[in-house]
Amino acid sequence: MLTLDDLDHFDDRGMALQAGASAPRTDAETLRRLARIVACLNFCRDIPDEELVEGGLHAARRTLRSVLRSGQRRRPLLQDAVTTALEGALLVLGEQAARRGEPGHAASERHAIEGEIQDVAGKLAGKDAVDPQLMDSLARGEFELLRSSDFAALLRAAGKFAAPVEVDLAVEGDGPAYLVRVHLKIESGLWRWTAGEGCCMSRNGDPALSLPPDDGVVQALLSGLALRSGRAIAAWAEAVGEH
């Protein structure tokens, strides 16, 4: 049976080399662990909802989404077989792994942006943030960028610019998912992006909270948007806009 220790190995980059023709020799215990992970993910598809412990359905969906995102953003941490199993498990739990209306190449750009946000948020753990709960969710990767975000001003700008953008996120936690809109004032030259005064955020449409430019949430989002000098977010925004 799958153990919590097995699940911890989803975050072990060493597991990235377990499959494939070029994989190095692997000890027997690691191979057994990988087999248990795949077998248990497939087995979970047949468990009736009424047999899950209280809160188990939510916990299962949350864990599966988190592991799947980790694989999408840090390939090849999860091999195709494990990714397929995760997508299947999510499907029977009522969750679509792929977004409707989002082309595959656009999804890859979004995963890269979200991965950069998560990495920077993790590095800034413990840094002052107006919303520590949101900061923790970003560091754990329990969020997704939404197509309702508004990057029009950013896409129109060229060279040195100052542009306001609206970043919409779906954020998960122990309870129901919630929506966050972060208003960023971005200033950029050819080589460096910075946040200006006037940034703020709103959770589920509540009154906005002011965010200083050096807030951890602001800096993490800014790093994601600045990936490849903004080409990643531009490619994603244009692709989903066409759909």
Image (cartoon, rainbow, N blue to C red):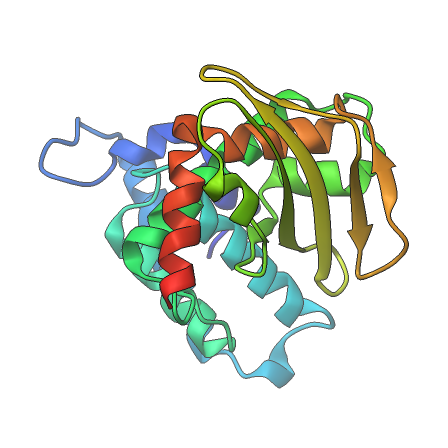
Q: Is residue 46 above or below residue 155?
A: below
Q: Outermost residue, left direction? A: 21
Q: Residue 111 or 211: which is nearer the viewer?
A: 211
Whether residue 71 is visible to the viewer of this picture, yes or no, is no
Where's the C terminus, which quadrant?
bottom left
Q: Residue at x 72, y 53 (%)?
A: 180
| Picture mark count | 0
Residue, x 53% and y 51% (percent of image)?
66
Residue 138 quadrant: top right
Looking at the image, which residue sits at the far right? Answer: 207
- Expressed as whole percent of the image width and height from the top left, the position of residue 37 reads 39, 52
| Residue at x 56% of width, y 34% of height | 117
Residue 141 drawn at (x, y percent): 58, 43
When the figure is inspected, residue 9 is found, relative to residue 195, above or below; the finding is below
- Asked whether the viewer can see residue 110, the reply is yes
Quarter of the image holding residue 242? bottom left
Q: 172 or 88: which is nearer to us? A: 172
Residue 171 x/y as whole percent: 67, 54
Spot occupied by residue 13 in the image (x, y as percentages of width and height): 39, 29
Q: In the image, 131: left or right of 169?
A: right
Q: Residue furthest top?
A: 191
Is 154 left, or right, of 20 in this rendering? Answer: right
Q: Residue 174, located in which quarter of the rendered image?
A: bottom right
Q: Is residue 5 left or right of residue 80?
A: right
